[in-house]
């Protein structure tokens, strides 16, 4: 082929096609624009890096045999050849084999993400919340499948059955795992847990990737509840471990971190019991000693000693009183006699007045007395019960009645009853 | 007992509250500054707290509440190691 020779567009592209399509290449890039398998014969997406984009195609039959779940942002290693389409003058990469990119590359991507989140302050130690000493509600965010949740519950039950375990199930693998974990964390945070365990069993570096996602990191950072991470096994470290308030190396380790040990607590309670008893005993002994010291003192051992001082005081007071009394009498004597004569005259005049009032009252009383009426020849009639009879209707023939006169009583028996028209 | 908090029924208190109060009582008794009657009252309260705490610790079964998803039984071979 000579430079001077002019080619048609088709010829030129044919040259490109011939030059490019012969090589098999291995490319590492980030998946973008993946829209699912769809109904086409090919599966289309792009591979990108910082500066470039390459359109890619996997034939559907090949794609289905790969057993790979693609998602945007996923780093993959693709083996294939270029395809040049002369009709449009475009280039694409036809993939014959594809797998998640090597761990080194993944680690580099995670490290880059961590650096970014650290710059944003998500891992600042000032944000780390202290763990509660005696949690009442322990939230566990993990997969509902597998042995991890059972291990965690067993550990908590053994160490601290006092607390309630709240379980928040989440996907821990796959494309939507980051979102699912973040959601479960948000729900756990809102559920009023005292502490949350974010745990997952061991797996490959890639298996643990959802725990290094931004979604999970932000969810941990915005939670108000302290979060303990326990993802994988030592020495696996995910971004979640950096953002969490405390990092445990395993799920069981996380459970142990948030639960005081029952056995230790029983020991503690016993030591408290002994401390209390000892303190009380000490105090009782002190009081007993004080009592013994007091008992030994003269005051208590000899009653006369106790009385001698008060007795002297009384004597002294008595002397003072004896001396003071006559003086007081003389001073008050005159005042007393004046008051006395005033009292006597007041008393007399009060008496006179009262006597008159009493006499008047008595004569009025006498006027009203029924006895006074009897002196004028009237009689009062009583039945056997001593009740006054004021009507013939209240008496029966042969009934015994008392007729009371001024100077005595007539015991009578009713022989006849004559009813008159009434007096008034 | 002057502090009202020290009169709340132990069964209504959380484990943490109970143990905090107990620690306070131990410190007070060891301080030896209380009147004998007060010491006896605190001692009695302390013993009540200890008994209630021990009962809570020995109640063996933990309460597990599931708020998202359902915990699957163990030994499901497909789900090992998750």
Image (tube, rainbow, N blue to C red):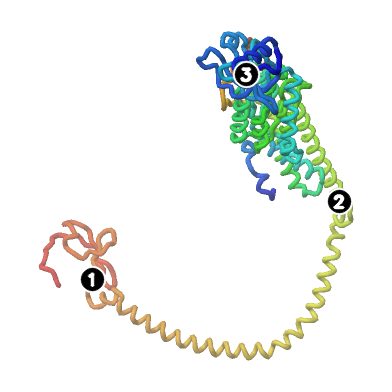
In this rendered view, identify the residue nearer to me: A369 or A213. A213
For label 3, the residue is A91
Q: Are marks 3 and 1 in contact (CB under 8 Å)?
A: no
Which residue is at 23% across, 71% downward? A379
Mark number, residue A295: 2
Q: Nearer the viewer, mark 3 or mark 2?
A: 3
Q: Which residue is mark 1?
A: A379
* Residue A170 visible: no
Q: Secondary structure at mark 1?
A: loop
Q: Secondary structure at mark 3?
A: strand
Quadrant in the picture for residue A44: top right
Image x and y of residue B65, in percent: 58, 26
Name the residue rendered at 60%, 13% in the picture.
Answer: A58
Q: CA distance from mark 3 to mark 2?
A: 112 Å
Q: Quadrant of the C terminus of chain A?
A: bottom left
Query: Which is nearer the N-term, disc 3 or disc 1?
Result: 3
Tell me the subunit letter for badge 1: A
Q: Which mark is residue A310?
A: none
Q: Residues within 10 Å of mark 3 (few under 14, many from 20)?
A: some
For the N terminus of chain A, the quadrant is top right
Between A325 and A223, which is closer to the camera in this rendering?
A223
**Looking at the picture, how far across and down is residue A212, in whole percent?**
70, 27
Tell if the residue under mark 3 belongs to the same chain as the one under mark 2.
Answer: yes
């Amino acid at each position: 082929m000579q430079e001077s020779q002019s080619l048609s567009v088709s010829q030129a592209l044919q040259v490109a096609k011939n030059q490019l399509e012969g090589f098999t290449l291995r490319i590492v890039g980030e998946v973008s624009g993946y829209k699912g398998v769809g109904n086409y014969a090919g599966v289309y997406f792009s591979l990108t890096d910082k500066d470039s984009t390459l359109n890619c195609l996997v034939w559907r039959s090949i794609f289905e045999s790969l057993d790979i779940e693609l998602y945007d942002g996923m780093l993959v290693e693709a083996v294939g050849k270029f395809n040049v389409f002369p009709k449009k003058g475009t280039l694409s990469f036809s993939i014959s084999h594809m797998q998640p990119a090597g761990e080194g590359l993944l680690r580099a991507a995670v490290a880059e993400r961590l650096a970014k989140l650290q710059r944003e302050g998500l891992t600042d130690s000032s944000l780390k919340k202290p763990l509660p000493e005696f949690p009442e509600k322990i939230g566990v965010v993990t997969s509902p499948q597998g042995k991890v949740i059972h291990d965690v519950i067993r550990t908590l039950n053994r160490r601290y059955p006092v607390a309630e375990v709240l379980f928040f199930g989440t996907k821990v693998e796959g494309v939507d795992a980051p979102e699912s974990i973040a959601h479960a964390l948000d729900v756990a945070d809102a559920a009023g847990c005292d502490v949350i365990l974010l745990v997952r069993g061991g797996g490959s570096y890639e298996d643990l990737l959802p725990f290094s996602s931004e979604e999970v990191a932000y969810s941990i950072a915005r939670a108000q509840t302290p979060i303990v991470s326990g993802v994988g096994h030592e020495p696996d470290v995910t971004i979640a471990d950096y953002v969490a308030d405390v990092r445990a190396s395993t799920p069981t380790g996380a459970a142990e971190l948030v639960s005081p040990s029952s056995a230790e607590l029983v020991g503690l309670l016993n030591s408290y019991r002994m401390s209390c008893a000892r303190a009380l005993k000490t105090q009782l002994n002190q009081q007993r000693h004080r009592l013994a010291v007091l008992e030994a003192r003269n005051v208590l051992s000899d009653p006369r000693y106790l009385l001698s001082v008060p007795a002297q005081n009384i004597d002294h007071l008595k002397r003072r009183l004896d001396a003071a009394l006559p003086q007081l009498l003389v001073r008050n004597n005159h005042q007393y006699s004046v008051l006395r004569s005033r009292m006597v005259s007041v008393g007399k005049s009060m008496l006179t007045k009262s006597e008159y009032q009493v006499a008047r009252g008595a004569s009025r009383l006498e006027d009203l007395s029924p006895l006074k009426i009897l002196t004028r020849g009237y009689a009062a009639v009583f039945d056997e019960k001593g009740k006054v009879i004021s009507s013939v209707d209240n008496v029966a023939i042969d009934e015994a009645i008392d007729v009371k006169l001024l100077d005595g009583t007539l015991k009578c028996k009713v022989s006849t009853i004559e009813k008159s028209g009434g007096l008034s | 007992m002057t502090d009202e908090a020290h009169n709340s029924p132990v069964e209504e208190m959380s484990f943490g509250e109970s143990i905090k109060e107990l620690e306070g009582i131990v410190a007070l008794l060891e301080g030896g500054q209380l009147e004998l009657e007060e010491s006896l009252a605190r001692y009695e309260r302390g013993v009540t707290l200890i008994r209630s705490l021990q009962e809570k610790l020995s109640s063996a079964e933990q309460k597990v509440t599931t708020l998202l998803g359902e915990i699957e039984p163990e030994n499901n071979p497909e789900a090992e190691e998750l």
